[in-house]
Image (cartoon, rainbow, N blue to C red):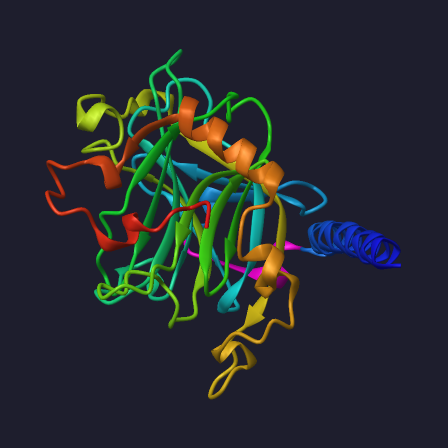
Amino acid sequence: MERRRASSMANRFLIAAVLFVLSCSSIQETAAQTSSFDDNFSKTCPETHFTASADGQTWYLSLDKESGCGFQTKERYRFGWFSMKLKLVSGDSAGVVTAYYMCSDCTHLGAGPERDEIDFEFLGNRTGQPYLIQTNVYKNGTGNREMRHVLWFDPAKDYHSYSILWNPLQLVFYVDRVPIRVYRNANYTNNFFPIDKPMNLISSIWNADDWATRGGLEKTNWTLAPFVSSYKDFSVDACKWEDPYPACVSTTTAHWWDQYPAWHLSDSEKLDYAWVQRNLVIYDYCKDTERFPKVPEECWISPWA
């Protein structure tokens, strides 16, 4: 009897887990199919530097010597799932940065001094060299939590999805649904986890040849301008911030991204994550004892927890 009961419970758990995954996929696919630029975003650049496909579903940002380009969501969010497909600048893109990030106080005029921020940054390259992807986390205006990875594909040849899972326990950075970085809420005294402030999702293309490629040694070749990055399939399943007292002011476990399966990597994700750590990480601030003689407290907690 006990064995049958245990088997029945295991079967119910397996079915529930499958339904959970399918429902998440369905939510994200539906959002991607129905999103339009004007519904979700505001431009933060000259009209000359933004174009869209005929059906309005693919968006192109360009950079030249006069200006870059960017956009940000009209809504602010606190916790959820955020995803978009990007195709980066091809060829010689040294000095060019395509940024895809979340920020609590960022506009086209600059970033606020007390902002929280969650970053993907794609650092341009000379032709034939690999793109670098840099992730970073800011809390109250302080960052310095960089990791850098190489990718297992050329991100300028086709569209790939870049996603952020953000809940009160962890941040997970995904590339094509593969977790490349896990940043846990350690709840230590430094409290270096963005948890209090709602954020917009933002993307931009800009010149950063003072640092982006080989530490600034490789400069932007403006004879190749305009540099163009493209976007499609924006997908969001998150808590919209509505003043004065939003529903997402605290964790409720009402959404899949704030339930137990989303608080930890799954077994298959742990395998992918381990492979990434072995093969693709080229810089991790947690291991940089020259910059941090005292290891930051959030580095103490295991991403496997």
Q: Quadrant of residue 283?
A: top left
Q: Is residue 95 above or below residue 180?
A: above
Q: Is residue 178 visible?
A: no
Q: Nearer the viewer, residue 215 or 268?
A: 268
Given residues 92 and 196, the one toward you in this image is 196
Residue closer to the observer: 189 or 62: 189
Asked if residue 41 lies in the magenta stretch, the reply is yes
- The residue range painted magenta reads 36-44
Task: Please say if 133 is above or below 169.
Answer: above
Seen at 86% across and 56% down, the residue is: 8
For image coordinates 37% across by 15% down, the residue present is: 129
Q: Quadrant of the N terminus?
A: bottom right
**Front-most of residues 288 and 42:** 288
For image coordinates 34% across by 51% down, the residue present is: 301
Q: Residue furthest top?
A: 128
Q: Position of residue 290 (x, y in %)?
A: 10, 36
The quarter of the displayed image where residue 34 is located = bottom right
In the visual, does 275 lie left or right of 293? right
Q: Could you tell whether 48 is left or right of 267 in the image?
A: left
